[in-house]
Amino acid sequence: MAAAKQVMPSEEPLSPFSRLFSMPGQDCFNIITIGCKTEGNAHAIVEGLKNTLINHPRFSSILETGLGEHKVKAKWIPTTVKVEDHVIVPDIDPNIENPDQFLEDYTTNMALSPMDKSKPLWEFHLLQLKTSYAGSVAVARFHHSLGDGMSLMSLLLACTRKTCDLEALPTFVVPKKSKARHICWSLIAWFWFIVRLLFHTCVEVFKSMVIVCFARDSVTPLKGKPGATISVNKFIHRIFSLDDVKVVKNAMNMTVNDVLLGVVQAGLSRYLSQKIDLNNKTSKSRKVLEKNNIYGVVFFNLRPNRNIEDLAKMMEKGSKSRWGNSIGYVLFPLWIRLEEDTLEYIRRAKITMDRKKLSLEPIFSFALLKFTMKVFGLKALKNLVNSIFSRTSVIFTNVVGPDEEISFFDHEISYIAASSCGVPQGLTIHIQSYVKKVIINLAVDLSVIPDPHHLCDLIIDSLNSMKSAVVEMGSYKLEV
């Protein structure tokens, strides 16, 4: 039987961040929605998981938190997994009136439901539901103690194969390498890079510590009322063209990430301007909006080896690969203004993000969390994490997906949307690319953002405005 291949690892202690995410009231989940082009086949998914996912130690172990009456060391305890208990196929009316709304409600209810900790902390829900973007939908829920979002997404993609070659793993866009330089110029460039790295690290780390310790966001419609409990209770996603993003990217000679971050800033600016009634766009009204200081948390993957080949081998042969929560963050000041030139949002995003990339702030933030845990304990770490999110308004993540069509256990994939819940933040924006599509997923607290569909519309409208602007400039070209 396929299940007989399951690897039974030895007990392992919990990492500091796994312990944090397993604390009472601190449950965090990663939610990944996979739109399939065809009707779902539960048997194929179960058999596929038996040969892949459960061979990973975390997915075949029970979480022992050590927080009960009998104080024991927190650890992962290997167990035999019955995959059928982790794949749920709900009975859905095929003639449901609004399938897109049903998917949003189902995903929200699933994300907010408690997870049975007497078995491994993951599950797949297969919905025989035709939506605007898919013929059926699989929704995966992973407890954050299993790993960070990037690790879990990479592991899931390691279970997929190209539709054009069912033995080949997905491929991703590889960044272009800079041209070789003369050795003298290389040494000068290297020295100048070190100087800039040290300078930007000192400046950005100092600003980050000031925000965490003293400053906080202005009170805007993006934040909840002071003292209110904030939690995600609504998930929505939309799909737009990656080619539209590339038109703007190539015209401005920037990265896709610069464009997407600029688009988000433009959309949030429009949303706030409407919420605080600045539609008249008078100079006085502009000053009111410009006085707001709004920060976002942008996550960085710190794992040096991002190849999914290692993860595929881990599941196939039981080999080892670095695993766990290994992410840093930067505190990003959002450019919230009413700009006549809509491309200014992208320029501002690039200027700020270039400084962040040319610093060690992500590594410092990760080290700060680990230091707090080791020196002051779990409660101090929990307070620090809550302080970071309470002083910011938005979480932003962007993940590069496969550049070719892939299938998930014989199910051709139409799109992949990812998000998370469990952190005290009213708005999380996750953007995922897939072939020629960009999927934007908003996770919101409806008491803070009561109209997430409208916010999503404004973000996409901002991209259309930027595309129109560069087309009028006549300086764009589309990458092939």
Image: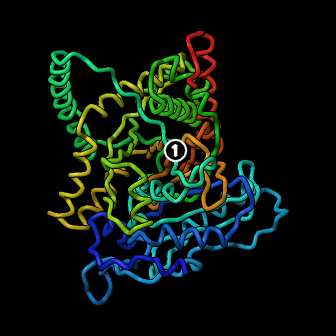
Q: Looking at the picture, how far across and down is residue 469, in whole percent?
A: 60, 16
Residue 452, image x, y percentages: 61, 46
Residue 244 vertical placement versus 132 (above, below): above
Q: Tell me what residue is drawn at x 52 percent, y 48 percent.
A: 170
Residue 197 placement, left or right of 458? left
- The image position of residue 113, as x and y in percent, is 55, 71
Give me the residue at 40% from left, 76% from top.
Answer: 7
Crowd around label 1: few <14 · some 14–19 · many ≥20 (10 Å): many
- Res 246 visible: yes
Name the residue at 20% across, 32% down: 203
Q: Amino acid at mark 1?
A: Gly
Of all residues, the one furthest to the right in this rendering is 95
Q: Secondary structure at mark 1?
A: loop
Quick one: 106 or 178, which is closer to the camera? Answer: 178
102 and 196: which is toward the camera: 196
Q: Quadrant of residue 378?
A: bottom left
Where residue 202 sits, quadrant-wise, is: top left
The residue labelled by disc 1 is: 401
Specify the quadrant that holds the C terminus.
top right
Residue at the image point whose x is 33% and y is 28% from the top = 354
